């Protein structure tokens, strides 16, 4: 049972003792060490028991193209966070001239489950020095989706394919945006290995932002890593895990249109029939303003990019704004009208422990089925989310972006656990129809953690509410490792 703190921002007297959502296996198709890259795997164990964790690496060396495998085992202590240094595991330093492309499978079998993310930082790769973070996939599938794949002047993209099977996989990538006839290319990805598609090299004649469907003869995992030398006035990189299936609702708690930042939501229709959809914006206000709605239509096999800066002009708005996109079939006979969606943020940010930085983030948000009401957009009941990654020491800012789309106020509880096994809980009141930015750095500094040890600042989290459905994404900003950037990750549910 979850026990929640009192309403407000005071520290809770009673701490959560149960687990957040977990899975026993996590898959990462993308990854790199050496050649300027440094990589970690972060593992959150929200259980009351210690977990034995296995990591299986599959990596290809740059110098000779040879494939290698390595397996390590570690212990994740109860109610704690583990940070595993991948460069050290593979014996390849960050600036080793011979790097390696890496895929990983993180698993446990002796406890209910864990949560795992992959933070990665790099210097001077394709004229960018930045980093990315992604929540792993919990199972391979034969079909994956992306609403937005940039190429050409929009950015450079790599689609990484992990084939964890003992048989080869024939993988087909189909590109579309409505203005072109869908274009497909097929490659064979060998058993127990990683393959790569490069959309910039596809025969697409100047097309930039594309919807993508990836299909395979074997169950695979797909990630999209993109690099932006200068796009919308910002440099950075972003990684997003493939979307497992279309949904009729996507929730994006994080988002901002402040000066120096451009926000876009790309909606893609992977079906041959048309759909209708609505963009709802919910602002960060003290009292809660009614959501702003924008109704749109989308033809089959097409995409539409929505400029949030242009639409964030409604009464009661602030720069910080959450979004919900929900859809339906244009006609009753045309399926369920499900779509895929992603939010891109090209940000300029001034941190509390560092000067102004730039970065790019991409998030597929949170898939939810919900029903529109006369005054609210209600997400189906999903009161608990887990995060593995988080860091709050000098050079890093961390936030939880919370959205309450209900017509009543709710209390949200945030429980942090660090690498020392310490735990603390705070709660916050999120007003009706409102977005709330929760400062994790501030929480850590006011906590009972052993702040003379840097491991106290490395935190995983469980975010929950007893009062009703809500959405949460974690935003990270950094100026460290000779890099700067931002990433946004939705909570695991």
Image: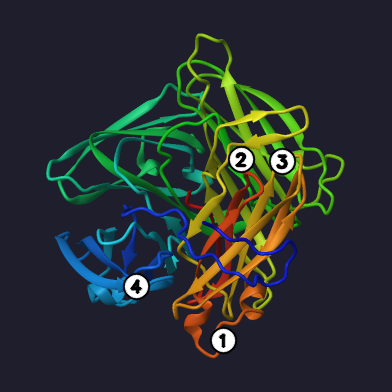
Mark positioned earlier in the residue sequence (1 or 3): 3
Mark positioned earlier in the residue sequence (4 or 1): 4
**Structural distance between the alpha carbons of marks 4 and 3:** 39 Å
Residue at the location (48% across, 77% down)? 481
Say which of marks 3 and 2 sits in front. Answer: 3
Q: Label 2: how many residues lie within 10 Å, few (<14), some (14-19) or many (20+)?
A: many
Residue 484 visible somewhere in the drawing: no
Colouring method of the image: rainbow
Mark 2: secondary structure: strand
**Structural distance between the alpha carbons of marks 4 and 2:** 33 Å
Q: Residue furthest right?
A: 315
Q: Which residue is labeled 1 in the image? A: 451
**Structural distance between the alpha carbons of marks 4 and 1:** 21 Å
Quadrant in the picture for residue 373: top right
Q: Which residue is labeled 3 in the image? A: 406
Q: Label 4: how many residues lie within 10 Å, few (<14), some (14-19) or many (20+)?
A: some
Residue 474 visible somewhere in the drawing: yes
Q: Which residue is labeled 2 in the image? A: 265
Q: Residue furthest bottom?
A: 452
**Structural distance between the alpha carbons of marks 3 and 2:** 22 Å
Q: Which residue is labeled 4 in the image? A: 84
Mark positioned earlier in the residue sequence (3 or 2): 2
Residue 246: mark: none
Residue at the location (53% across, 50% down)? 362
């Amino acid at each position: 049972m979850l026990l929640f703190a009192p309403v407000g921002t005071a520290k809770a007297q009673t701490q959560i003792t149960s687990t957040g959502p977990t899975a026993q296996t996590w898959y990462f198709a993308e990854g790199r060490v050496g050649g300027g890259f440094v990589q970690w795997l972060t593992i959150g164990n929200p259980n009351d028991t210690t977990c034995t964790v296995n990591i299986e690496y599959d990596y290809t060396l740059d110098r000779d193209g040879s494939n290698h495998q390595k397996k390590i085992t570690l212990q994740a202590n109860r109610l704690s966070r583990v940070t595993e240094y991948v460069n050290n595991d593979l014996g390849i330093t960050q600036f080793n001239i011979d790097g390696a492309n890496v895929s990983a499978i993180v698993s446990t079998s002796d406890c209910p489950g864990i949560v795992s993310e992959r933070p990665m930082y790099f210097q001077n790769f394709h004229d960018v020095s930045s980093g990315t973070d992604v929540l792993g996939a919990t199972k391979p599938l034969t079909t994956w989706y992306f609403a937005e794949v940039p190429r050409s002047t929009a950015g450079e993209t790599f689609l990484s394919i992990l084939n964890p099977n003992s048989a080869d996989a024939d993988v087909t990538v189909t590109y579309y945006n409505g203005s072109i006839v869908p274009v497909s290319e097929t490659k064979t990805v060998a058993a127990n290995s990683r393959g790569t598609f490069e959309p910039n090299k596809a025969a697409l004649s100047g097309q930039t932002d594309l919807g993508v469907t990836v299909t395979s003869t074997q169950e695979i995992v797909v990630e999209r890593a993109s690099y932006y030398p200068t796009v919308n006035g910002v440099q950075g990189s972003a990684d997003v895990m493939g979307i497992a299936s279309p949904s009729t609702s996507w929730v994006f708690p994080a988002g901002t249109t402040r000066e120096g930042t451009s926000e876009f939501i790309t909606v893609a229709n992977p079906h041959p029939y048309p759909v209708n959809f609505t963009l709802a914006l919910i602002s960060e206000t003290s009292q809660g303003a009614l959501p702003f709605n924008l109704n749109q239509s989308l033809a089959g096999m097409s995409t539409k990019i929505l400029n949030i800066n242009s639409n964030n002009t409604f009464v009661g708005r602030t720069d910080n704004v959450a979004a919900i996109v929900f859809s339906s079939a244009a006609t009753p006979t045309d399926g369920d009208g499900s779509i895929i969606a992603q939010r891109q943020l090209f940000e300029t940010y001034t941190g509390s422990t560092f000067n102004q930085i730039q970065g790019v983030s991409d998030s597929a948000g949170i898939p939810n089925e919900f029903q529109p009401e006369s005054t609210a957009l209600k997400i189906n009941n999903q009161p608990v989310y887990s995060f593995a990654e988080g860091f709050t020491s000098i050079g890093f800012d961390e936030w939880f972006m919370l959205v309450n789309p209900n017509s009543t106020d709710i209390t949200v509880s945030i429980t942090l656990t660090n690498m020392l096994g310490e735990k603390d809980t705070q709660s916050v009141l999120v007003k009706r129809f409102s977005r709330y930015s929760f400062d994790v750095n501030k929480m850590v500094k006011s906590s009972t953690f052993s702040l003379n040890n840097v491991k106290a600042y490395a935190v995983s989290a469980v975010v929950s509410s007893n009062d009703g459905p809500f959405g949460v994404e974690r935003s990270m900003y950094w100026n460290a490792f000779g890099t700067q950037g931002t990433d946004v990750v939705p909570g695991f549910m």
